[in-house]
Image (cartoon, grey):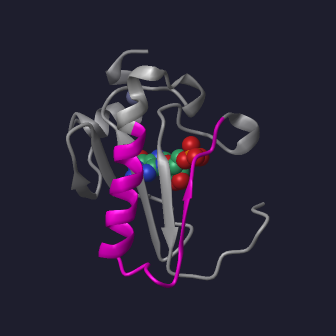
C-alpha cells in the first residue's frame, strides 16, 4: 500500500488533517475522530505497519516507545490515578478498521470488562 492510500500515513505526513497532540521520533498521537471516552487518543507509528501481527524484531524499540508515549499522555490528560486503557485491535474480528497499527488510549470514565 502506498502512503497516499493510507489514512494514518497521510496524517503522519501532514497531508490529512488531524488534531495532533504529540510527536515523537517515530510516533505521532492525535485525537480519535469518534471518541469512545472523554479522552480517546490514537498513538501511531509514522512507519506503515498494517497491524500488530506484522511487527518484527526491528520494531522492538518502537513498541516500547509507544507505551512510554501512552503513559506520558495518560499523565498529561490526568488519567492517573483514575486509570486508563491502552488497546490494540488486531484483525477485523477484533474491531480493527484502519490497517495501520495504532494504540488507543482511553480514559476519563469507568471501563467495563470484558470489552464488547
Ligand atoms: P480501529 O477500529 O482500527 O481499532 O481504530 C480506528 C480508529 O480510527 C477508530 O476509533 C476511528 O474512530 C478512528 N478514525 C477513523 N477515521 C479517522 C480520521 O479520519 N481521523 C481520526 N482522527 N480518527 C479516525
Ligand atoms: Zn499507513
Residue 81: x, y in percent?
47, 84
Residue at x 58%, y 47% (from the top left corner): 88
Residue at x 37%, y 15% (from the top left corner): 2
In the picture, measured across the screen, residue 61 lies left or right of residue 13, that is right
Depicted 31 relative to depicted 110: above or below: above
Place residue 15 in its image quadrant. top left
Residue at x 45%, y 21% (from the top left corner): 57
In the picture, measured across the screen, residue 10 lies left or right of residue 107, that is left
In the picture, measured across the screen, residue 97 lies left or right of residue 49, that is right
Q: Can residue 109 be seen by looking at this rendering? A: yes
Q: Total marks drawn?
A: 0
Asked if residue 36 is among those painted magenta in the image, a careful observer would answer no
Region in magenta: 63-90
Depicted 26 relative to depicted 56: above or below: below
Q: Can residue 6 be seen by looking at this rendering? A: no
Place residue 45 in its image quadrant. top left
Residue 49: x, y in percent?
45, 26
Residue 62: x, y in percent?
36, 36
Amino acid at each position: 500500500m502506498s502512503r497516499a492510500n493510507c489514512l494514518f500515513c497521510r496524517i503522519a505526513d501532514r497531508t490529512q488533517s488531524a488534531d495532533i497532540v504529540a510527536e515523537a521520533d517515530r510516533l505521532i498521537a492525535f485525537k480519535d475522530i469518534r471518541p469512545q471516552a472523554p479522552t480517546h487518543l490514537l498513538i501511531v507509528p509514522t512507519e506503515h505497519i498494517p497491524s500488530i501481527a506484522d511487527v518484527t524484531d526491528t520494531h522492538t524499540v518502537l513498541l516500547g516507545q509507544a507505551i512510554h508515549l501512552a503513559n506520558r499522555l495518560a499523565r498529561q490528560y490526568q488519567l492517573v490515578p483514575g486509570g486508563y486503557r491502552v488497546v490494540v485491535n488486531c484483525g477485523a474480528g477484533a474491531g480493527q478498521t484502519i490497517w495501520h497499527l495504532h494504540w488507543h488510549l482511553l480514559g476519563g470514565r469507568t471501563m467495563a470488562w470484558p470489552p464488547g
